[in-house]
């Protein structure tokens, strides 16, 4: 018995020594040092030798524009895949960028516009897509499959596209307000004092002013940008609010009669309120495409890809167009999109209108000028 006990002690000592050795080799017991909070915490597991089978996460975090997805799509995805989707919303590309730059690590899917995709790629903020998880990418119309801001769709998949223009109450206007003059010409804009909104968006609002002045909305000339700033400051006395999320509801509620805004949001309101309609200014305006992208810091990249692939299904892509009233870059979705949307020239503009539309581009070194002048507009007295 004694011998046995001694043997036990020796074995215990050896085993204990081994445990100490292992812990020492691993640098001591793992202490949670500044553990990331939120969904990002999942990625800090101990390194795995062999890559595991991709597994779906329980929760997916989407950072999207407001009213920019059919709510049923989230519910259907959850029912089919068992993944709960939590959505936060942003109101401008610059807000989205600032959030990522500030180190937000919890988002799995984000929805930047064209020029912002380019900026984010350059700043190393986006992950590359794994096409093995995106078989439905073949549904994207070839016209949209090689965007200049992300050649070959390496980082993002086009989601919806549209234009920027003027939403209005048809009972107030005899003729459609189809010129930027309605918003900027003092003679005209003053007639609608306190009755119109401008987008709370530096590139869109400075862009509209540049267009009214006859310049490109991608101007990098300090002189032209100063003129646009001065015009916006002059206009401010007549502006009800700078708003990118409720401009259409404000027309409906008779708070305003006109709004600088995005096509689909206006048409969504028009579907509920037949007094509302939309015009693309004859001087030309913005055409844009928003994209589904995965931040490099996404905690659940595989699940994000499964979700993006789901959004690429023809019926799902069509449901999102039908809900948002925005045009779809998904060719296979066309047969499921309401004819009312497909046949609306202000949603799918004819070539002569298309020719006057301009994409917002990354203006590189002129970006701080846009930021500074926009801050000056916002800070100016009413
Ligand atoms: C959605 C607004 C969309 C987008 N409410 C502008 N890129």
Image (cartoon, rainbow, N blue to C red):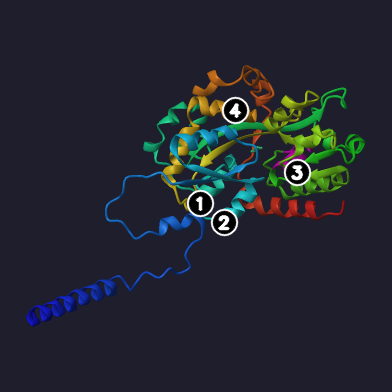
The mark found on residue 243 in the picture is 3
Nearest the camera: 238 or 253? 253
Nearest the camera: 345 or 297? 297
Q: Residue at x 73, y 45 (%)?
A: 200
112 vs 283, left or right, is left
Q: Is residue 191 visible?
A: yes
Nearest the camera: 347 or 215? 347
Q: Residue at x 51, y 60 (%)?
A: 37
Nearest the camera: 116 or 63? 63
**Earlier sequence position, callout 1 versus callout 3:** 1
Circle 4 is placed at which residue position?
A: 321
Question: Are the residues at dot 3 and dot 4 in contact (C-beta closer than 8 Å)?
Answer: no
Give above or below for 183 relative to 60: above
Q: Residue at x 37, y 59 (%)?
A: 45
Circle 2 is placed at which residue position?
A: 101
Question: Are the residues at dot 1 and dot 2 in contact (C-beta closer than 8 Å)?
Answer: yes
Q: Closer to us: mark 1 or mark 3?
A: 3
126 vs 194, left or right, is left
Circle 1 is placed at which residue position?
A: 125
Question: Are the residues at dot 1 and dot 4 in contact (C-beta closer than 8 Å)?
Answer: no
CA separation in Å, label 3 and label 4 = 23 Å
Ligand 1 visible in quadrant: top right
Q: Is residue 214 visible?
A: no
């Amino acid at each position: 018995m004694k011998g046995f006990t001694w043997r036990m002690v020796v074995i215990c000592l050896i085993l204990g020594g081994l445990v100490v050795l292992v812990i020492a080799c691993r640098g001591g017991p793992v202490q949670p040092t500044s553990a990331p909070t939120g969904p990002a915490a999942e990625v800090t597991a101990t390194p795995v030798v062999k890559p595991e089978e991709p597994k779906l996460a329980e929760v997916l975090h989407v950072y999207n524009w407001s009213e920019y997805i059919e709510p049923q799509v989230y519910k259907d995805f959850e029912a089919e895949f068992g993944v709960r989707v939590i959505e936060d919303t942003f109101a401008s590309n610059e807000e989205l960028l600032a959030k990522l730059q500030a180190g937000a690590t919890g988002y799995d899917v984000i929805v930047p516009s064209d020029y912002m995709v380019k900026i984010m790629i350059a700043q190393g903020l986006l992950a590359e897509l794994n096409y093995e998880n995106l078989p439905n990418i073949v549904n994207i119309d070839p016209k949209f499959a090689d965007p200049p801001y992300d050649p070959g769709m390496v980082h993002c998949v086009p989601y919806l596209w549209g234009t920027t223009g003027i939403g209005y109450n048809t009972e107030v206007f005899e003729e459609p307000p189809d010129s930027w003059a309605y918003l900027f010409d003092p003679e005209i804009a003053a007639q609608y004092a306190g009755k119109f909104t401008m987008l709370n968006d530096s590139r869109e609002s400075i862009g509209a002013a540049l267009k009214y002045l006859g310049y490109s909305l991608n101007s990098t000339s300090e002189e032209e940008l100063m003129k646009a700033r001065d015009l916006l400051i002059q206009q401010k006395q007549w502006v009800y609010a700078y708003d990118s999320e409720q401009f259409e509801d404000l027309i409906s509620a008779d708070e305003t009669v006109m709004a600088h805004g995005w096509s689909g949001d206006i048409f969504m309101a028009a579907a509920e309120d037949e007094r509302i309609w939309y015009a693309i200014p004859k001087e030309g305006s913005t055409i844009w495409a928003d994209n589904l992208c995965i931040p490099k810091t996404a905690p659940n990249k595989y699940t994000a890809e499964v979700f993006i692939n789901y959004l690429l299904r023809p019926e799902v892509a069509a449901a999102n167009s039908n809900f948002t009233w925005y045009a779809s870059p998904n060719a296979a979705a066309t047969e499921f999109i309401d004819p009312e949307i497909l046949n609306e020239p202000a949603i799918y503009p004819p070539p002569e209108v298309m020719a006057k539309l301009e994409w917002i581009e990354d203006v590189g070194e002129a970006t701080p000028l846009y930021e500074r002048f926009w801050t000056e507009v916002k800070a100016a007295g009413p």
